[in-house]
Image (cartoon, rainbow, N blue to C red):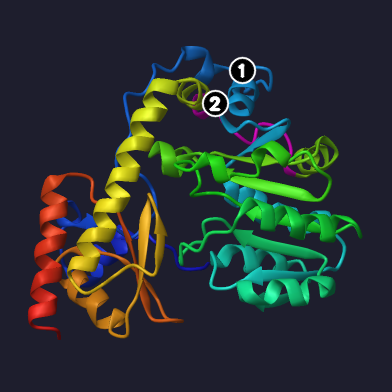
Amino acid sequence: MLEHGGRLRAAARRHGIALADWLDLSTGVAPHGWALPAIPATAWSRLPEPDDGLDDAARDYYGAPALLPVAGSQAAIQALPRLRGPSRVGILSPAYAEHAAAWRREGHQLLALEAEQVDERLAQLDVLLLINPNNPSGQRFASEQLLAWHARLAARGGWLLVDEAFIDCTPQHSLAAYSDLPGLIVLRSFGKFFGLAGIRLGFVLAEPALLKRLDELLGPWTVNGPARAVATALLRDRQGQRAQRERLLADGRRLGELLGAHGLPPSGGCALFQCCVYPRAQQLHAFLAAHGILTRLFDSPPSLRFGLPADEPGWTRLEQALGRFMEHPI
């Protein structure tokens, strides 16, 4: 199993700090949401039905012609490599490690690329996989560039696979509206923007023929009834979405400014996280953890990813800890 953010219990044991005393900034999940709807009793007592309104609500929210709900985008990440024969897969690096692991597990040939190399190397690829904005670097890609790469791949039966897990606050940059084009696959995460990572829900946006193959591979009832009921209501709540988007955008700017004021100008980021390339990232990560603040450490390049504090005490705690480290770095 690959390492991920959010393993708070392990950090609590390792550092001897009670679970309730941590400030967890290790994930890119919104630290706040809004009132959840009541779950009807039938969502618990009956098997999920595909015509319950979830698909319609999601298509409206994402602006996608066709989609498939899945048990978190992780389910699609692991299944999609099984829908192609042996392929040459370019993955922009650094990136969410589960993507590369899934394609490697199915025997595909992987090629790690930097964004500047894509144009030159695209003719060698059957699949180009990237995250927009990227996790963890926060690098962004223009829709026009992505569609141009897609056209070159699709002309010879290739795929462009774009993971848009962190794009909800800037939906104008999404490829969702184009996702019915052959060879274009877009992944969307529900839990990050809505602050409900535990619901384990995501969506695959693609042409109907590919969605049918993926649906058959995953099997029936991949998304449970209560999750479907909650998600349908929140996907229809335009007022709540606007408020969430405004708050997250403001918090993302605030986090970038706070880090910059303490000598850690973000090298990239989005509304849900900021990434700082920093030579002493490992020391800062350890210092913050010793003070009950969990961040996400990356080795190459040495960097830290900071998620959003949930409340004012959290913001104050982060600011004070960064100030102490910069005054007396270990």
- Secondary structure under the numbered disc 2 in the rendered image: helix
Residue at (60, 23) in percent of width and height:
54
Q: Position of residue 220 (x, y in %)?
A: 71, 33
Q: Residue 267 sits in which quadrant?
A: bottom left
Q: Residue furthest top?
A: 41
Residue at (78, 44) in percent of width and height:
217
Residue 113 position (above or below residue 131): below
Q: Position of residue 51 (x, y in %)?
A: 68, 18
Amino acid under label 1? Gly
In the rendered view, does 188 fall on the left or right side of 49? left
Read off the residue under disc 2: 228
- Secondary structure under the numbered disc 1 in the rendered image: loop
Q: Which residues are magenta?
A: 218-228
Q: Residue 158 sits in which quadrant?
A: bottom right
Q: Is residue 142 magenta?
A: no
Give residue 53's mark: 1
Whether residue 9 can be seen here: yes
Q: Residues within 10 Å of mark 1 (few under 14, many from 20)?
A: some
